[in-house]
Image: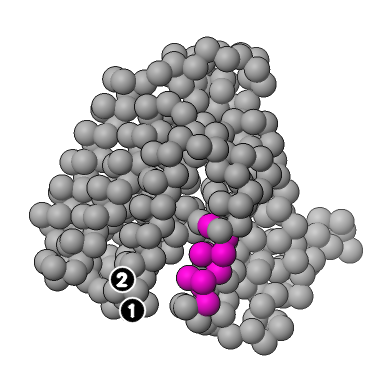
Amino acid sequence: MAPSDLLSLIVTAPSYQAPLALMIGLVGLAYGGNLLVPATLSLAKQLHISPALVAVIVLAGGTSMPELLVSVQAAFQDSPAIALGNVVGSNLANSWLVLGLGGLIAPILIAGGQIKRDALVMVLLTALVIIGLVPLGGLGVGMALIMLAILTAYLIVSIRADEVDTEEEEMLEGGLARASVMTALSLICLVAGAELIVSGGQGLARQAGISEGVIGLTIIAIGTSLPEIAAVIASQLRGRSDIALGNVLGSNIFNIGMILGVTGLISPLTLGDGVTLTSLGFLAASALLLAGLVARKAPMQKAISLGFLGLYVIFIWHQI
């Protein structure tokens, strides 16, 4: 048997698929996370904008693209509730799980007008979701257009009012093309690595006899946040709280403004199928607590990080 035939047999064998996917996914996350910060700093320098703005637009927008594609497909298949549940779960994970883990590594410093603007827009979009779903009975075309308009205005204002960071540590050599390619590569590794980990985790869980419900609430829920987790951990290890916080806030903004905005144009979004008034209460609490933390301008210390992680555990326990 040729070596290539042996490799093919190992990859395609059911007993090896799950652990192999997990291992490759972990390597992808590690490589993407390690490359992310220097690539982001280099791209920011070449474009003459701040790393925080790159984190908001490029990183957050890039890591939200897979969820957008899934949500649009679900809407065309008359299952828009998948998009709503995805956004609610993702934003809660970003605010409490991702930042909670990041804050345990090092205090998350809060500074700059960009971060305050991000927090304000996040709260505004969250409020629109709750208003649309509860008093108005659903997110239709009108509310979707408003969300997309707010997202567009937010991006324009952020670019025009950007505060350029002139620090030059940890940057990659080369020009704009290299910085762009390396940033894109880091995003691809993060997203693809997360997908492989989720796939491998599902396979191992099924082999162990774990129910689909538990798999969905644990492996899939956390797995969709793995790119943000890896990005925040990599940023914190290099002392770049601006990239870590900008990535989380930007992801929350894109999740609502872009994913729910585009999905709402295709099919109305209503409560149900796992998203309840209690779920919206958790979503509102996460947005307000995070915005309050930004308004205080105090570093996010370990005590607050543990509190955020505790709130996420409570949310998961309630869902179960």
Image point (73%, 48%), residue name: 27
Up-down relation of residue 8 to residue 234 (above or below):
below
Residue holding disc 1: 273
Give the x, y percent position of residue 89: 43, 64
- The image quadrant that residue 272 belongs to is bottom left
Q: Position of residue 44 (x, y in %)?
A: 49, 21
Asked if one can make out residue 83 in the rendered structure from this viewpoint, the answer is no
Above or below — where is 237 with respect to 137? above
Q: Is residue 8 magenta?
A: no
Please name the colour scheme applied to the rendered image: one colour
- The majority secondary structure of the magenta stretch comes to helix
Left or right of residue 270, residue 58 in this image: right
The residue at 13%/68% (across/down) is 135
Distance CA(mark 1)–CA(mark 2): 6 Å
Residue 275 in which image quadrant: bottom left
Name the residue that disc number 2 marks: 81
* Residue 254 - label: none
Q: Which residue is drawn at 38% across and 45% down?
A: 291
Three-letter code, disc 1: Asp
- Element under label 2? helix
Query: Which residues fall within the magenta stretch?
Result: 308-317
User: Is the Cβ of the residue at disc 1 closer than 8 Å to that at disc 2?
Assistant: yes
State which tag comes first along the sequence, 1 or 2.
2
Where residue 179 appears, x then y in whole percent? 56, 22
Q: Is residue 35 left or right of residue 84?
A: right
Magenta highlight on residue 312: yes
What's under tag 2, amino acid-wise?
Answer: Ala
Q: Nearer the viewer, residue 68 or 120?
A: 120
The vertical placement of 22 against 40, above or below, is below
Q: Which type of secondary structure does the marked residue at label 1 adopt?
A: loop
